[in-house]
Image (cartoon, rainbow, N blue to C red):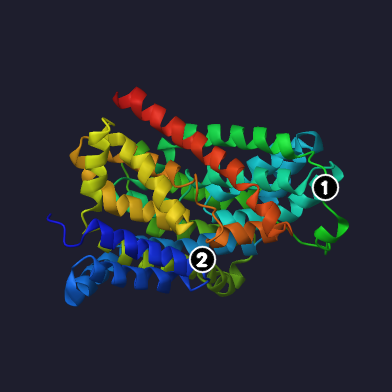
Amino acid sequence: MEAQFTTLGALIGLAIAIVLIIKKVQPAYSLILGALIGGLIGGGGLSTTVSTMVSGAGSMMSSILRILTSGILAGSLIKTGSAEKIAETIVEKLGEKRAVAAISIATMIICAVGVFIDISVITVAPIALAIGKRAKLSKSGILIAMIGGGKAGNIISPNPNTIAISEAFSQDLTAVMMRNFVPALCALAMAIFLASLVSKRSGDEISSSDLESSGEKNLPAFGPAVLGPVVVIVMLALRPIAGIAIDPLIALPVGGFVSMLATGKIKNCIEYMEFGLSKVIGVSILLIGTGTIAGIIKASALQYDVTNILEAMNMPAFVLAPLAGILMAAATASTTAGATVAAQTFAPTLLANGVSGLAAAAMIHAGATVLDSLPHGSFFHATGGAVNMSIGNRMKLIPFEAAIGLTSTIVSVIMYLILHG
């Protein structure tokens, strides 16, 4: 398809969106305005620009529908106390001596079963702060442990980013999740290693004021708590195992209702569904805005120019996948938005150059976790607030987070070279 917009216009539009997001303008509006200005500067004309934006937003609809229904699972796990019970059990079983590993593993599992990464960190944070204070760990150490575990879980989860990438490459969701299982374990190991290094950092201790008051909570037993996520995993696994395709649109809400039934909270289903919707509506709206800028970028000469640069540098085509994930996630400060823009824009180029859809999806997904937590995104502030950390101290953790994401990215690329080299 011939480019309708110039590379310069697409990049200026993206830059304007980034600046607006940094200036605290609502991200979806920032992306829409950036797309409009980028299209006009890129020479598309008003009519072409608007139609391309609408088409780009429309391409997100199947992902948005699945994300909206995933809110039923997320809402049930959080409101029934299942997410907290899973985290609490893991920490208790591993004990204070392995506190850093317990915190990382707990966050990874919570995120991997379908809870969004920021919510996973917020869910585990009160438990992590309490055990961190007893074990004399620093805030920096436990936050790196939670974020690193969350990053590991995020690339093997039925979360919005995974759904959007699998849609862009027309790949089975379960296959995309499982492809990054080994990279996720390597990222988890790196998270535990780095968190352990800074967990004894002085001047960053957890104080009593950081701990939430421990009101009595009636949490479910561990078995009922994990039943919902287990049902989702089994339903999604039926396609590769038995050839029975159950769409995430069905599997994710079914898992949510099973969780409510197992924990005896089905009578609260309307409340939990509304809560879950409140958690996913933001990312759904963000994806509409992301779709508009992705439409402009996809219809621009950017992908051809980037490909030509790689060829001029004698770099293989597959390098485009992790590089696109890294750069677009850094630009949007969001795993979901970055991975979606990268996948929507470069999927045709990668497939045309012989890179398998599954491998490309996995490498983009892993790459999107390297620089996704920059200060112009909400994740940076949500995670810092979860442990009452100052912005200055939160900034110091970005290199550690990038190292964890880069670990999964490198391993994902190595796996591609081994399997397809």
Q: Seen in the image, is 221 located left or right of residue 7?
A: right
Examine the rendered structure and indicate whether residue 135 appears above or below residue 121.
above
**For the residues marked 2 and 1, what is the alpha-carbon distance in whole angstroms?**
29 Å
Examine the rendered structure and indicate whether residue 121 appears above or below residue 282.
above
Residue corresponding to mark 1: 203
Q: Seen in the image, is 266 located left or right of residue 315?
A: right
Under mark 2, the amino acid is Ile
Quadrant position of residue 284: bottom left
Compare residues 183 and 110 and report the one nearer the observer.
Answer: 183
Compare residues 370 and 57 and report the one nearer the observer.
Answer: 370
Pick whichever of labels 2 and 1 is earlier in the sequence: 2
> In percent of the image, x 42 and y 71: which residue is there?
30
Q: Secondary structure at mark 1?
A: loop
Under mark 1, the amino acid is Gly
Mark 2–mark 1 CB contact (< 8 Å): no
Q: Residue 394: horizontal and vertical position, in percent?
A: 66, 53
> In percent of the image, x 21 and y 47: which residue is there?
304
Q: Residue 173: horizontal and vertical position, in percent?
A: 37, 47
Q: Residue 159: horizontal and vertical position, in percent?
A: 47, 54
Neighbour tally class for label 1: few under 14, some 14-19, many 20 plus, Cα within 10 Å: few
Q: Residue 398: horizontal and vertical position, in percent?
A: 59, 47
Quadrant position of residue 58: bottom left
Label ID, residue 98 = none
